[in-house]
Image (cartoon, rainbow, N blue to C red):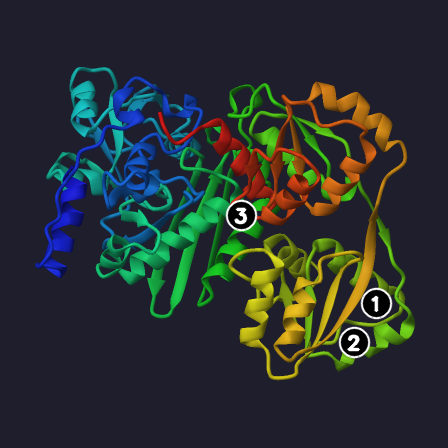
Amino acid sequence: MIQAKLAADALARRYPEHEFILVPVGTHGDRHPTLRLTDSAREGVFVKELEQALLEGRAELAVHSAKDLPTMPTPGLELAAFLDRADAHDVLIARPPSTLAQLPSGSRLGTGSPRRAAQIAAIRPDLRAVEIRGNVDTRLRRLAEGAVDALILAAAGLERLGLLGEAHELLPFSVMLPAPGQGALAIQAVEASQAAELAAGIDHPDTSRAVRAERLLLRSLGGGCLSAVGAYAAVAGDELVLDAVVLGDGGGEVLRARAQGVDDAEIVRQVTARLEGEGATRLLRTRAADGPLAGLRIMVTRADDQATSLTQALEAEGATAVACPVIAIEPIEVDADRLAALDGYEWAVFTSANGVDRLLAQLQRAGRLFPVHIKVAAIGPQTAARLRDRGLNPVLMPARFIAEELADALVAAMMPQARILVARAAGARDVLPDRLRAAGARVDVLELYRAISPPGLRQRLAQHLDRVDMVTFTSSSTVAHLAEAIDRPLPERVAVACIGPITAQTARDLGMRVDIIAQEYTTRGLVEAIVRSRTPISA
């Protein structure tokens, strides 16, 4: 309530002609004070009911601790503003008063955060982390009663409560990196609403830039607000400086990375790549028995060479992934003249990671390099990542990862009558080249591969479909090939999850019931949509 009043007061100062009224809402986390956060089946235990109040019109703005917000946005809502960030450090409070270094071996350290517990264990493995829940007053009382010997709390929360004087040590970032968003208050509203517009008027730009980068990093790593991930970004002039840490259970492994620059997305990408290169994905995997998808058998229909990331992401959430590729990738040979003609294009547009691999493989066999003057566009982050892995830097990627959005972004960026090469699969939709041509571009389509049915598909589907709970589709071609290979409808109990609206429409056109559509059209977005379907917004 104190944090909500801070936001209401800031709004009232900016808009004295409006009245801002606090509407208390109890949350799942509030109603279950003994629930261990690491045992919760979902993130956002302090968030979802507030979001529901926005969606139902019972409130127009919601105030959140930014560190509590799940990384996946809620459809129809936006983070309209961030207030000026308070101190993002964590602090130690001990009885009797002491610093972290002075705590006796075996001391019980109260925290409900895997991030805090792991970072303390990395430097003081002789201390014992004890799960503790409740508001600040409750935790301080537990400390006074002797339930624990010390507490770790956020400096910002204590400061807002007027209790910062209780702290005995401000833990430096070298010891304890904060949770992404720690110390910041986020104001959420219905997308494009008047309330969102009002909130934007009190947004603190540096805080917004820093917290959005921290949240993007957490999302890029595939972690959540309950992960053992610390991150802190600061704005220095025009540049963003981002520090991050990923820890294994018990603090036995500690991975750190830092990057600095003016392109926030590139800084996040660099930090993510360094952490993943050192093994962050392995450390962040949830225990299968406790994951939100535990007990689900989910079919992965992607081609074998593309299925690994989806399989691992599903298994990290507790699912049993059943590999049943319904397509195989068959390269299409491009004649030497067409490869030589690449020099004449101003743009090369890639609509899949497969397209990147096939074109560069053929150039390599022909002894050619990709022309350095060509600007490169990618339909989404996975394609962009593959380009970067192969030494090409995409300069354009749409906000939504579909052909229509890519065409609009290119039309805005290209020169009149630009020469554009669209590298894609055979049989892909023509919406992208058609829109570009309508805008005056000179477009050539280069078909580099085709999706074919692998041998024995019908028999494998017959074995698996009666034993899985869900089928995932990551392209229209996976839908079409599965539909062609089965001689009956999908079993009623089998749910269908699609990577985006185009794939979903193909499934519907072929008579399938679509249960889940990813909001972000990536592997990670698909997995998050499946997890979200298991943890509905209403508690």
Image check: 148 left or right of 222? Answer: left
The secondary element bearing badge 1 is classed as: helix
Figure check: 480 above or below 143: below
Q: Nearer the viewer, residue 6 or 26?
A: 26
Residue extending furthest toward the bottom: 416
Compare marks 1 and 3 and give the one earlier in the sequence: 1
The answer to whether marks 1 and 2 mark residues whose Cβ atoms lie closer than 8 Å is yes
Identify the residue shown where x is 36% and y is 56%.
210
The secondary element bearing badge 2 is classed as: helix
Instruction: For marks 2 and 3, give the one nearer the viewer.
Output: 3
Mark 3 — residue?
A: 520
Compare marks 1 and 2 and give the one earlier in the sequence: 2
Give the Cα distance between marks 1 and 3.
32 Å
Name the kind of residue labelled 2 in the image.
Leu
Figure check: 380 above or below 21: below
Compare marks 2 and 3 and give the one earlier in the sequence: 2
- Where does residue 34 sit, x and y in percent of width and height? 30, 17
Q: Nearer the viewer, residue 458 or 296?
A: 458
Image check: 286 left or right of 148? Answer: right
Q: Residues within 10 Å of mark 3 (few under 14, many from 20)?
A: many
Name the kind of residue labelled 3 in the image.
Glu
Q: Quadrant of the N terminus?
A: top left
Image check: 390 left or right of 88? Answer: right
Name the kind of residue labelled 1 in the image.
Leu
- Where does residue 286 sit, x and y in percent of width and height? 53, 28
Mark 1 — residue?
A: 363
Mark 2 — residue?
A: 342
The quarter holding residue 74 reads top left
The secondary element bearing badge 3 is classed as: loop
